[in-house]
Image (cartoon, grey):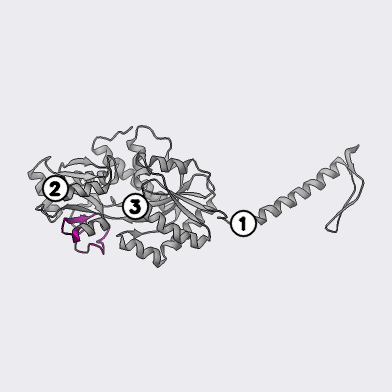
């Protein structure tokens, strides 16, 4: 073999290791390849365990929403577990599309997560004519965090105290009763439509830009009922302005122990229509990171400082593996798809 055009005939010493004379290309290539691999291995081994920088949790709704409250409470505990900052960013607008899209387009490295309810994930793909993403294909499940049951509320002057009386009133006054929700195609809208279908009644939908305005109009007597979170319901009931006639949770709530569930009142169509919240990441995020975030989320949710906070709001914590969240998303997509189809479809631009 011919000598290498660049040969090293002078011996060098580095950390007491003698570099031999390299007189051929083959020798040179073998030597420097070995040095490169040794350095690369050292760099990999020297990397800090994840996370080695701040983590973002993006919420596709405004501050104060259910997703926001859960994200901020969870972020505080996760930052203690990880010894790293966990920052919550609200990217509200366009029915959650803006926030979800930000996570879909983020680097799949675990440093950008999404805390969301079902609507942006499984309802938007059905009701919007066009979306910039496919949530179920472009997001990886991390953990099913919890559920937030809600209550059917009526004005305290309305002559109904349970679902049977509500249905009787609605049938006696066809298309006269109305209900408010926090938007066309929202979880509340579809949940009440599921009740309409199951009860065989037809109440008029009045969409609002949030739960607050709907509750205000209910108190003013502008609508017949609405579906609101239990914390809101409890405060208005104590004030003597509203009455709860049913909750859509799997069991009665400690916040409203005297209010029966829909299932108890023989209206199972509302089973599973409560809000669910999940933690997700961009698809392609390493499975080891997904598993770590999931396990640490479960640990955080089991902490009394976290669980007590959520219980006071009427939430029920679940904490689950990525597979269980994946199953929940599939179930919810099927449930809401059937409701939307039954009411003739909803198409939004």
Badge 3, how many Cα within 10 Å: few under 14, some, many 20+? few
- Calculate the distance from the C-alpha at mark 3 to the C-alpha at mark 1: 35 Å
Q: Is residue 240 left or right of residue 249?
A: left
Q: Earlier in the sequence, mark 3 or mark 2?
A: 3
Helix, strand or loop under label 1: loop
Q: Earlier in the sequence, mark 3 or mark 1?
A: 1
- The residue segment tinted magenta is 237-262
- Where does the image place residue 336, in percent across and percent down from the top left? 30, 43
Which residue in the protein does label 3 denote?
Answer: 64
Residue at screen point 51% across, 56% down: 85
Q: Earlier in the sequence, mark 1 or mark 2?
A: 1
Residue at screen point 28% across, 46% down: 210
Indicate which label's residue lies in the foreground, 3 or 1.
Answer: 3
Which residue in the protein does label 1 denote?
Answer: 48
Does residue 307 belong to the magenta stretch?
Answer: no
Helix, strand or loop under label 3: loop
Depicted 233 relative to depicted 124: above or below: below
Asked whether disc 3 touches disc 1, contact meaning CB atoms under 8 Å apart, the reply is no
Residue 263 sits in quarter: bottom left
Q: Indicate which disc residue 221 carries.
A: 2
Residue 136 sits in quarter: top left
- Where does the image place residue 160, in percent across and percent down from the top left? 11, 53
Residue farthest toward the bottom in the current orientation of the protein = 304
- Where does the image place residue 141, in percent across and percent down from the top left? 45, 49
Where does the C terminus fall, quadrant-wise?
top left
Helix, strand or loop under label 2: loop
Q: Is residue 94 left or right of residue 259?
A: right
Residue farthest toward the left in the current orientation of the protein = 172
Q: How many marks?
A: 3
- Where does the image place residue 105, in percent across and percent down from the top left? 49, 40
- Calculate the distance from the C-alpha at mark 3 to the C-alpha at mark 2: 25 Å
Asked whether disc 1 touches disc 2, contact meaning CB atoms under 8 Å apart, the reply is no
């Amino acid at each position: 073999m011919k000598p290498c055009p660049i040969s090293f005939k002078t011996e060098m010493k580095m950390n007491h290791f003698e570099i031999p004379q390299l007189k051929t290309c083959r020798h040179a290539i073998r030597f420097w390849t070995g040095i490169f691999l040794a350095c690369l291995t050292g760099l990999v081994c020297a990397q800090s365990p994840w996370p080695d920088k701040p983590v973002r949790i993006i919420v596709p709704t405004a501050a104060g929403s259910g997703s926001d409250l859960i994200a901020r409470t969870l972020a505080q505990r996760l930052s203690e577990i990880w010894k790293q900052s966990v920052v919550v960013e609200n990217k509200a607008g366009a029915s959650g599309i803006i926030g979800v899209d930000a996570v879909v387009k983020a680097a799949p490295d675990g440093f950008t997560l999404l805390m969301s309810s079902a609507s942006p994930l499984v309802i938007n793909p059905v009701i919007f004519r066009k979306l910039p993403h496919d949530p179920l294909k472009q997001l990886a499940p991390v953990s099913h965090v919890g559920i937030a049951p809600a209550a059917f509320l009526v004005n305290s002057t309305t002559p109904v105290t349970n679902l049977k009386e509500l249905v009787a009133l609605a049938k006696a006054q066809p298309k006269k009763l109305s209900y408010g929700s926090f938007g066309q195609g929202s979880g509340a809208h579809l949940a009440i439509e599921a009740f309409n279908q199951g009860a065989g009644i037809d109440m008029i939908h009045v969409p609002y830009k949030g739960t607050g305005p709907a509750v205000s109009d209910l108190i003013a007597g502008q609508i017949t009922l609405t579906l609101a979170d239990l914390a809101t319901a409890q405060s208005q009931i104590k004030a003597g302005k509203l009455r709860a006639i049913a909750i859509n949770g799997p069991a009665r709530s400690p916040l409203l122990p005297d209010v029966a569930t829909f299932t108890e009142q023989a209206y199972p169509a509302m089973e599973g229509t409560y809000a669910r919240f999940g933690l997700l990441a961009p698809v392609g995020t390493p499975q080891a990171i997904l598993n770590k975030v999931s396990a640490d989320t479960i640990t955080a949710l089991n902490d009394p400082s976290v669980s007590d906070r959520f219980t006071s709001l009427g939430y029920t914590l679940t904490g689950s593996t990525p597979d269980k969240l994946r199953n929940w998303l599939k179930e919810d997509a099927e449930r809401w798809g059937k409701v939307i189809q039954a009411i003739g479809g909803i198409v939004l631009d």
